[in-house]
Image (cartoon, rainbow, N blue to C red):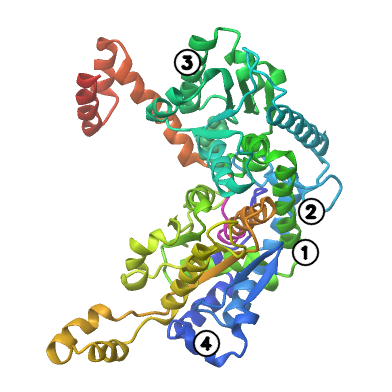
Amino acid sequence: MPSSLATALRPADSPAFQALGRHHAIASQWRMHDLFDAEPARERRFSLEAAGLFLDYSKNRADAETLALLCALARERGVGQQRDRMFGGAAINNTEQRAALHTALRAPPGSGPGSAPTLDGQDIARDIADVLARIRTFTDQVRSGRWHGVTGKPLTTIVNIGIGGSFLGPKMAVHALRTHCDPALSIHFISNVDASELDALLPRLDAETTLFIVASKTFGTAETMMNAHSARAWLVAQCGAEAPARHFVAVSTNVAAVTAFGIDAANMFPFWDWVGGRYSVWSAVGLALALAIGADGFDAFLAGGHAMDRHFCEAPLEANMPVLLAMLGIWYRNFCDCGSLSIAPYWQDLQYLPAYLQQLDMESNGKRVGADGTALQTATAPVIWGDVGTNGQHAYFQLLHQGTDVVPVDFITVLQPPATHRRHHTALLANCFAQSAALMRGKTADEVRAELHAAGITGAACEALVPHKTFPGNRPSNTILLPAMTPHALGALVALYEHKVFVQGVVWGINSFDQWGVELGKALAKGVEAALTDAPEAAANAVDTGFDPSTRNLLARARAAL
Ligand code: G6Q
């Protein structure tokens, strides 16, 4: 085998997988609330705390035997060993021959899991500490007003220019930690190559007090570079050619491209190729977050991630939060035929969490071949989607309750109320808990009949309504409680899902750390753009020869409009 995540057998060949198949024939008949009746204290046995988070996984179509079989599958697939290889810096991203050491970014030096001091002879612990120290110095300077713009004014507006992994993490975290952010700073994110974002933002900004962070691992991503060039032109037009030196900083692995763009290496915060884009919020890619919440807050965020790392490395599989979340996901995906997972944060500031987890999960595990390149026989990543509660309840929850597909839901909420409007928080929690209860409980035809009779609707009118008002119930969910919305709790939550995705990747035998499907998009657009912008003759040639008839037709229509 290559030095990959694959183990010798395909998952479907493993004895535990086959035992789960047989078990499913019985379990598919179960009603969850019968499981509660049959298993005293199920809610306590099927819940656990880790790194300050509480997970209730009792509302699942699973009993103790299901979980034992799922953990046996995790064991057969080598989850423990592969976890240790990841934390130890093995090149588990085998198609790019890279380690996946985002855990090292949040490990206090010399302190257990993830603190791998060297990688290929390089003292990465020291590299990480150096960059963290620079982040601290810079954030302190900006937040205290000691970092001046070209006209001598402090910088109070931060614009992060980046996309994908260089955008979704910091944006999600800055919004999630809104109440921890310095109110004197306003933080914005520009990602899309569609200029609408720039057009909507720049006219509202004062160039003299604006700092741009260009975040790009490669410093070659077309959207980011186009936005960075446009933003620099806007700044220079207002503050002169000297302005970028004080108003632009970069976060990247590519010092040559950063300096070629015109940002001094002294104003570049480096990270490394062993940090995957979607795992990079813990690196200097989190600079916007560090500016927003301060270096101490950023340290607390890292500490929360590390606390989850410790749990993941130390807890037995049967009491391991990421493993349990992952294996229940395997149960639904591979045995119960559920094609998607809905993320429902009942906390408005977590509004960007579904999109963040969508990238984390679908870009990592949306694969159809194993790490060794052979076709998989099992389904992999589900579609991840969702929105904040209670908004979703007034929209797509209809499908969750009564649609033909069973969609497992992860409910995520925060116990500590915000400082103001506490009654709103009571209502928010009530809705969160009511929805998971209702999804499990459902409503029988007899219950509907009784309700209609009580409302004076009887006979044919009643019977016509019964099927519409009946809920099948037995729809599974997890509930994750954060004690309060703090940097530490958010760090633990993000690391929880990172490890969940990792475990699923190991079980499926795939490389969760490459993204060739995303790379394709980057390459394709270049050729199409040339066909849109080249001189008419060259473009006509490309339009005629390079593309399928549908694309040629679209290009012709677009060229006429440009
Ligand atoms: C993440 C992906 C992808 C990447 C973006 C931006 O894991 O690789 O989302 O983060 O394409 O890439 P750059 O940071 O190189 O601009």
Q: Position of residue 402 (x, y in %)?
A: 32, 73
Question: Which amino acid type corresponds to the residue marked 3 in the rendered image?
Answer: Trp
| Residue at screen point 43% across, 32% down | 192
| Residue at screen point 53% across, 79% down | 62
**For this rendering, which residue is in front, 332 or 55?**
55
Q: CA distance from mark 1 to mark 2?
A: 9 Å
Which residue is the site of mark 1? Answer: 314
Residue 374 visible, this orientation: no
Question: Which amino acid type corresponds to the residue marked 1 in the rendered image?
Answer: Glu
**Mark 1: few, some, or many residues within 10 Å (few <14, many ≥20)?**
few
**For this rendering, which residue is in front, 150 or 12?**
150
Q: CA distance from mark 4 to mark 3?
A: 63 Å
The majority secondary structure of the magenta stretch comes to: helix
Decide which of tag 4 and tag 3 comes sooner along the chain.
4
Question: Which amino acid type corresponds to the residue marked 4 in the rendered image?
Answer: Leu
Mark 1–mark 2 contact, CB under 8 Å? yes
Which residue is the site of mark 4? Answer: 35
Q: Quadrant of the C terminus?
A: top left
| Residues shaded magenta | 503-511
Decide which of tag 1 and tag 3 comes sooner along the chain.
3
Which residue is the site of mark 2? Answer: 113
Q: Position of residue 58 (x, y in %)?
A: 56, 78
Which residue is the site of mark 3? Answer: 234
